[in-house]
Image (spheres, rainbow, N blue to C red):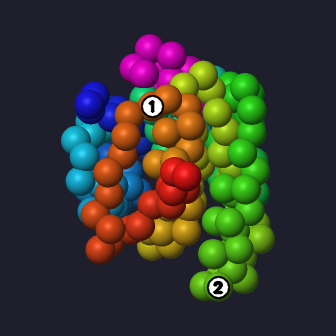
């Protein structure tokens, strides 16, 4: 069984300022460490909120680093510099709109401004790319909602088998007949 490579990309205007503590990327790593019992390796980057940088990073993680899952945080709001969904769509072969729909529905249980979020997901080659919001609390809420489908999606793409701590998160995999 191969070790899964999972890309974690923090997109932030503050990334280029030099003094920046990335709480969002660390929150993703913490949640994945809680969920996953199988071995995995993070491929972690903090990049500026610029379309070219986001696209290049996603392409590198999918095509060169061979990440089966790439999770982004930040750049999904309505501000002019929030371009993560556009960069994701530009590099994906096919989109997976159900991920964004479910994340917004889940977030609406907590804040009415969830309708402003533009998270999306898509497939590039053998990689699933999922855009998350930028706040650690929202990251957890969204991952709790969509992660049960992620291991099976990666199975369907012939990726590594992700085993989870079912006391923390229960992935859905159809039973074989």
Name of the residue lying farthest toward the top: 64
Residue at image x 66%, y 56%? Answer: 99
Disc number at residue 31?
A: none
- Residue 142 at x, y = what percent? 54, 66
Quadrant of residue 113 within the rendered picture: bottom right
Q: Which mark is residue 159?
A: 1
> Which residue shows up at 66% across the image and 45% down it?
121
Q: Is residue 83 visible?
A: no
Q: Quadrant of residue 96?
A: top right
- Residue at image position (32%, 51%) is 163
Residue at figure coordinates x 72%, y 26% from the top left: 93
The span from disc 1 to disc 2 (Cα, nearest Å) is 33 Å
> Is disc 2 placed on a helix, strand or loop?
loop
Height in image: 1 above or below 74?
Answer: above
Q: Which residues are magenta?
A: 53-66
Q: Residues within 10 Å of mark 2 (few under 14, many from 20)?
A: few
Helix, strand or loop at disc 1?
loop
On the image, the x and y values in percent for residue 91 come to 68, 25
Q: Is residue 169 left or right of residue 34?
A: right
Q: Position of residue 139 (x, y in %)?
A: 48, 64
Left or right of 134? Residue 32 is: left
Q: Is residue 7 visible?
A: yes
| Residue 145 horizontal/vertical position (percent) | 55, 68
Which badge, 1 or 2, is on the more N-terminal residue?
A: 2
């Amino acid at each position: 069984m191969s070790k899964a490579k999972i890309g974690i990309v923090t997109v932030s205007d503050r990334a280029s300022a030099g003094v920046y503590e990335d709480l969002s990327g660390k929150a993703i790593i913490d949640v994945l460490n809680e969920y996953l019992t199988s071995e995995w390796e993070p491929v972690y980057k903090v990049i500026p909120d610029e379309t070219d940088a986001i696209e290049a990073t996603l392409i590198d993680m999918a095509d060169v680093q061979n990440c089966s899952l790439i999770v982004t945080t930040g750049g999904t709001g309505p501000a002019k510099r929030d371009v993560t969904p556009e960069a994701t769509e530009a590099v994906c072969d096919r989109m997976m709109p159900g991920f964004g729909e479910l994340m917004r529905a889940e977030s609406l249980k907590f804040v009415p401004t969830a309708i402003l979020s533009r998270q999306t997901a898509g497939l590039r080659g053998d990689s699933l790319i999922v855009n998350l919001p930028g706040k650690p609390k929202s990251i957890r809420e969204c991952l709790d909602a969509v992660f049960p489908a992620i291991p099976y999606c990666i199975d369907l793409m012939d990726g590594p088998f992700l085993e989870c701590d079912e006391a923390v998160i229960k992935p859905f995999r159809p039973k074989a007949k």
